[in-house]
Image (tube, helix red, strand yellow):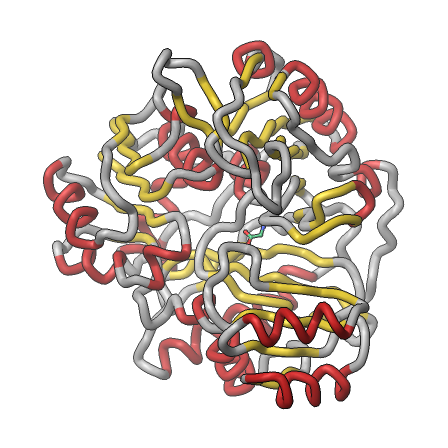
Amino acid sequence: MRTLVIGSGGREHALALALSRSPEVTEVHVAPGNPGVESFAIRHEVDPVDGIAVAALAIAIAADLVVIGPEAPLVDGVADRVRLTGIPCFGPSADAAQLEGSKAFAKDIMAAAGVPTADARVCQGEAESAAALDEFGPPYVVKDDSLAAGKGVVVTYSREEALAHAVACDRVVIEQFLDGPEVSLFAVTDGTTVVPLQPAQDFKRAADYDHGPNTGGMGAYTPLAWTPDGLVEHVQKTVLQPTVDEMARRGTPFVGLLYAGLALTSNGVKVVEFNARFGDPETQPLLALLDSSLYELLHAAATGTLADADAPRWKDAAAVAVVIASENYPDKPTVGDEIEGVADAEALDGVDVIHAGTDRNEAGRLVTSGGRVLAVTATGRTLSDARLAAYRGVGLIKIRGAHHRSDIALLAATGHVATPSI
Ligand code: GLY
């Protein structure tokens, strides 16, 4: 079987790698991909948001499955274009991707479906925003209503900073702050049947112990031994299935990956955000532990046969991904710095180095090309083993000015995350 993955980040590298390890898959194509996929996949110079070009490529390579990684092509309707060709496509339509594309739309769906989430106001302009900030009080949560590539959310105690962000955006959602630890729970769905994956946790702030600015994600791990029993079943019943049912009821079935960002608050589990695609970097450790065929799972979702597919199986192990970011990320990351030591890190037992912001310079050497450069992803028998291997890998990679967090999965590995009730 031939698969085509659309996108160029770490998530797409991890998806392509897991597809290449699926027994049914004979060829993996990625457009445009990154240098990390070159050893097992064929790259194509196609713009991920050009739906006609993506559909033409899918036909040209006789793809059996197209998997669209990032949110921008989904919101732009690239999955709709691919489906017109008759080739199975994993990824929601433009209408369904509004679950991520518009925070206000997501709030509307949650209200209609009775899904627990933070109380919120949709605001435009200074007066409306100031009133909502004063209604909820600090810490202030201000979310750009449109896609903002991980930069749209500001959580701050500074009313001035919160108001400045609200005014700088066209339309914002201002909401109540949700306390409690956060969990990312992904579900594969064909629009009717919902199959949750194993929970993961990511680390959004740039610096250790959740200091510094918000980023796209500086690391992740799975499984989460500290979560309460029955969490996945509870979220399936109260969040995932009602949301998928409400989308179908509106005539815009959601086919693809529903990402529920959850807060396990003192008042129960609530949705912080929905995304319409796999999370990055949670996908890296999650797929490192997948012990069944990713192709089979995604193909079943894309063809409406998920109810008949085998449930995903997970290795009885742990996985940790540590992101190495370039100098000045997330503000203005520098690019073009040489990257050394990737092969040494990959030679370690259980370690995959997943590329995100990498490219080749004219001499063919690997260089940085974006903020999040690599995710060193390791599996181990325990979370501590996986952490040790991941950080050993990080230590072998040299990039001028690069930085990473040193506390990814630390509290969980040392038993310092308290189990909340649900
Ligand atoms: N890890 C956060 C995201 O993928 O949006």
Q: Quadrant of residue 254?
A: bottom left
Residue 130, percent from left and from top: 69, 85
Residue 179, percent from left and from top: 79, 68
Horizontal side, residue 250 vs residue 267: left or right: left
Q: Quadrant of residue 393?
A: top right
> Does the rendering let one see residue 95?
yes
**As displayed, is residue 38 above or below residue 126?**
above
**As displayed, is residue 168 above or below residue 8?**
below
Residue 93, percent from left and from top: 30, 65
Q: Nearer the viewer, residue 413 or 304?
A: 413
Check the picture and name the quadrant holding the C terminus.
bottom right
> Does the rendering let one see residue 314?
no
At x 75%, y 39%, the residue is: 409
At x 62%, y 17%, the residue is: 397
Horizontal side, residue 310 vs residue 127: left or right: left
At x 82%, y 45%, the residue is: 209
At x 47%, y 41%, the residue is: 11
Check the picture and name the quadrant holding the N terminus.
top left
**As displayed, is residue 206 above or below residue 235?**
above
**As displayed, is residue 4 above or below residue 105?**
above
Q: Quadrant of residue 165?
A: bottom right
